[in-house]
Image: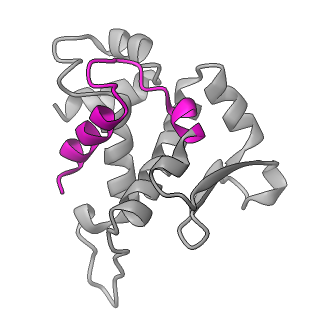
């Protein structure tokens, strides 16, 4: 399924079709509605690898979020909100939709659309910044109204 269409389906399911601001923290609270075994945990930095802000474990269906990132997202910090959206996107693509993890052997590159990081980045961007709702807006308007960083707004607007 195309990622933009998947994002729109998720927004529709959550009754957020016409909402600029995607409430990612609140969506975490209902993660079990996507899969009854799914949950998230707020963890301390030393429970994750160095430089990891959040991770998704597809075996246990758990999203682990560093406590400072979660607090930042709760306080509207765009980068932290997008980090959580990225992990939610991993959960959706890998646990709910059953996308496959792509591997490369030798010097063969994995096409970007088969790369789980690329997929999560794209789906998170589409969830947080609905392409139909932001047409004609400036980067700063998108950043403010969608609750994302200026860089995320710039990147997503370049894909419309």
Q: Is residue 83 magenta?
A: no
- Residue 67 sits in which quadrant? top right
User: Is 99 positioned to the left or the right of 67 in the image?
Assistant: left
Q: 139 or 59, which is in the foreground?
A: 59
User: Is 93 positioned to the left or the right of 110 in the image?
Assistant: right
Q: Which residue appears at 72% of the width and 61% of the height?
A: 49
Quarter of the figure that contains the N terminus: bottom left
Q: Is residue 7 magenta?
A: yes
Residue that sits furthest to the bottom in the current view: 106
Coordinates of residue 104 in the picture (x, y in percent)? 34, 83
Q: Is residue 49 above or below residue 27?
A: below
Q: Is residue 142 above or below residue 26?
A: above
Q: Which residue appears at 16% of the width and 31% of the height?
A: 160
Q: How many marks are shown on the rendered structure?
A: 0
Q: 22 or 139, which is in the foreground?
A: 22
Q: Is residue 69 above or below residue 114?
A: above
Span colored in magenta: 1-29
- Residue 151 sits in which quadrant? top left
- Residue 157 sits in which quadrant? top left
Coordinates of residue 158 in the picture (x, y in percent)? 21, 31
Q: 92 or 158, which is in the foreground?
A: 92
Q: Which residue appears at 23% of the width and 11% of the height?
A: 137
Q: Which residue appears at 79% of the width and 50% of the height?
A: 45
Q: Is residue 20 above or below residue 56?
A: above
Can residue 126 be seen at all in this image of the molecule?
A: yes
């Amino acid at each position: 399924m195309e990622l933009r269409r998947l994002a729109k389906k998720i927004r529709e399911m959550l009754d957020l079709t016409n909402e600029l601001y995607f409430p990612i923290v609140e969506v975490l609270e209902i993660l079990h509605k996507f899969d009854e075994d799914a949950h998230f945990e707020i963890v301390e930095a030393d429970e994750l690898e160095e430089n990891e802000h959040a991770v998704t474990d597809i075996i246990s269906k758990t999203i682990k979020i560093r406590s400072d990132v979660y607090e930042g997202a709760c306080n509207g910090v765009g980068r932290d909100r997008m980090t959580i959206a990225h992990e939610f996107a991993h959960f959706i693509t890998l646990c709910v939709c059953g996308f496959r993890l792509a591997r490369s052997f030798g010097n063969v590159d994995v096409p970007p659309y088969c790369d789980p990081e690329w997929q999560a980045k794209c789906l998170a961007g589409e969830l947080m910044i609905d392409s139909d709702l932001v047409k004609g807006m400036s980067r700063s308007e998108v950043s403010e109204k969608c609750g994302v960083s200026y860089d995320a707004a710039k990147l997503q607007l370049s894909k419309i």
